[in-house]
Structures are given as structure tokens and as C-alpha cells.
Image (cartoon, rainbow, N blue to C red):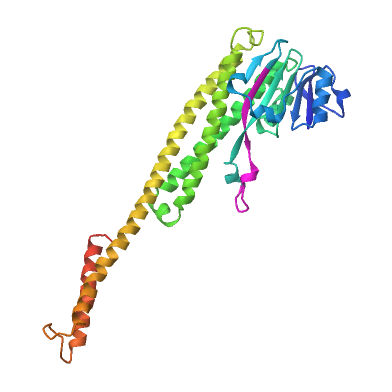
Amino acid sequence: MLEAFYATERGSLEDATINGGFDLHPELVWIDLIAPSQEEQQWVTDAYEQNLPTLKSLEDISSSARFYRDDDGVLHISTYFLTKNKNYQVDNENDESANMLTTVQTVAFILNKERLLTLRGEKLVAFRAFRARARRNDYDVDYKDPIWILLGLFEAKLDELADILEDIHKDLEKYSTEVLNNHHREQVLDLDDMITRLAQQEDMLGKAQLCLIDLRRILTFLSRPRALGSHIYDGEIREMSEDVRSLVEHNAFLFQKVRFLLDTTSGFINAEQNDTIRRFSILPSMLTPPMLVTSLYGMNTTVLPFAHGDYSFTAVSIIIVASFVIPTAYFRWKKWI
């Protein structure tokens, strides 16, 4: 899929209809390729004389080559975005829990003085949010300058990560109530399922951390002198850098909260297992006295009391029952069972 945009007189972005390479005219300021075919990539190459990487090559880029400026002055940036992965959703899973399973996707940005080219494997929430914002252009940004499109996409990525962390925070507060409420934990909560949910949250936090650190490195690169050719973008870059720093700190706090809940839940599981083992260990102690009495009276001897007589069976039965009831009452008094 290939989508293109041009800037209006007031600086907002509008969609351009692309039916072939002949529609890629010089006035377009943003070309967005989503899992493009070879033909679509060739259209861009022929129209703008710009070679594009393949989607497979994006995954193999080393961390040291994720952003650079080539000999022609073209800026190349490869960065991570979070995306929902529906392949992991099971049949009985609702959308809310499915949202917790995400993957990291690499997106390529190629920026020159005239336009921005982006290449990605699938649709992303941050891109959709930025397009809606750029069409409205509430802050009167001049998107005729493709650098503002680049910074706008990074800001949309940052907003999405902030929303993800906020949702995780809300979920962790709910999980804390479920785990620490004794009645709910003992009567309703499935602790093994809670371990799975917390593991999903920790996995998402790790991927969010990866995206934040990657964005921080890019912003540091863009803040260097002559990186963008002008100082008019420095204020926006500094503001986003501060937001990244705050989100990294918040992400670290959420990591600690997840670890606390994982440790607490694991502790409750161990306590339940120990309680079950203790109950099975006490059971032989409860059965040993009546079994001993039964064994003694089962021997062929006359020295035991109540071994003979009309009421011997009744007396022995009472002794057997008493030998079971008395230890049981003691164990219950000690709250061992």
C-alpha cells in the first residue's frame, strides 16, 4: 500500500490519490509505504531517485546504523514502534486482554529537503493519530517542511507510549486489589492466571522501554548542531526529550510494581502449596492412632482390656473413634487443618 500527502496553503496535510508512478509529483511532502509491493517501491525509486530498504533488511540493521546522514545529505532513521499482534489472540480471549500482546516493528524514515519517505510493515496507531492531527492542524504547524512531519510522527509515537503506560498503570492497580484482597484471592482469583497477566504486562513494559530508549537516542542525534540544518526545531526536540525522560522513569516505576505483584502472587501460590503439603502430612498423623488400636486388638491376645465380653466390640469401637477424634480436635485447635 502506498499513501501520499501534500501540504495545503495553511500548512495542513491532505491525502493525494495515487494510481501509479505518474501521480508521484514533486509537490508531495510525505510518501508512506505500508508493506509495499515491488512495483510501488519502483514507482518511488523512479519518481524521486531514492533507493528504499526492504522490510526484511530493516530487522537486520545494527544499533550503530539506525540513524545517519548519507553523502547526499539525506537523513536515514530506523526506529521502533509498538504494534498489536492478533496472531497471539485465542478464541475465548476478549479484545482487552488481546491488547496486552504486542510486538515491536521497525519503521524507516528517509528525509530530504523536499519530502519524507516512511516504510513500515503494517498499519500503526501512531501514524493514524498523526494523520488526523495533521489534517486538522490545530497548532498551525507548517507541514510544507517535512521535518515537522518527522517530529510530528515522533510526538505521536510518544503519545501512544504514554497511553500504553497509563493503561498498564490502571491494570496494575486493579491487579493489586485482586491479589491483596484476601476474600477475592481465596474465593475468586486464579493465581496462575494472574501470573500470566503480570508476565504480559512485564513483556509490554520491556518493549515500551526499548521504544523509549530508541527514541531518546534519535532525539539526542537530532539535537546535534547541523543535524537538521536549523535551530528552529530545538525547542520541540527538547520538549520531547523531557517527555521521554519522564516516561522512562514512569516505566521503571511500573517495572518495580509488576515485580512486586509477581513476587507477592508467587508467595501466595507457594503458601497454598505448602498448606496443601502440610494437610497431607497431618493426615497420616490423624490416622495412625486408630490404625494402631485396630492392629493391637486384631492380635490374638487376652491381655488387652475389653478384648472379651458382651460389650467388647462397642468398647473397642469407642476407643478407635476417640483415638481419631482427639488428635483431630487438637489439630483443629492448633489451626493446622
Q: Residue furthest right?
A: 22
Report whether 244 appears left or right of 261.
right
Q: Residue furthest bottom?
A: 310
Q: Quadrant of residue 114?
A: top right
**Where residue 217 sits in the image (x, y, percent)?**
56, 19
Report whether 282 appears left or right of 72.
left
Residue 184 appears anywhere in the view: yes
The residue that appears at 57% across and 33% down in the rendered structure is 163
Q: Residue furthest front?
A: 300
Q: 328 above or below 56? A: below
- Comparing 262 with 140, the one in front is 262
Q: Quadrant of the N terminus?
A: top right
Q: Which residues are magenta?
A: 76-94
Q: Quadrant of the C terminus?
A: bottom left
Q: Quadrant of residue 232?
A: top right
Residue 84 sits inside the magenta stretch = yes
Q: 201 above or below 68? A: below
The residue that appears at 39% across and 42% down in the rendered structure is 263
- Comparing 78 with 225, the one in front is 78
Residue 139 appears anywhere in the view: no
**Where residue 190 sits in the image (x, y, percent)?**
46, 53
- Comparing 70 with 229, the one in front is 70
- Comparing 87 with 159, the one in front is 87
**Where residue 127 sits in the image (x, y, percent)?**
69, 29
**Where residue 269 sits in the image (x, y, percent)?**
39, 51
The residue that appears at 63% across and 53% down in the rendered structure is 91
Number of dots carrying numbers: 0
Q: Quadrant of residue 214?
A: top right
Residue 121 sits inside the magenta stretch = no
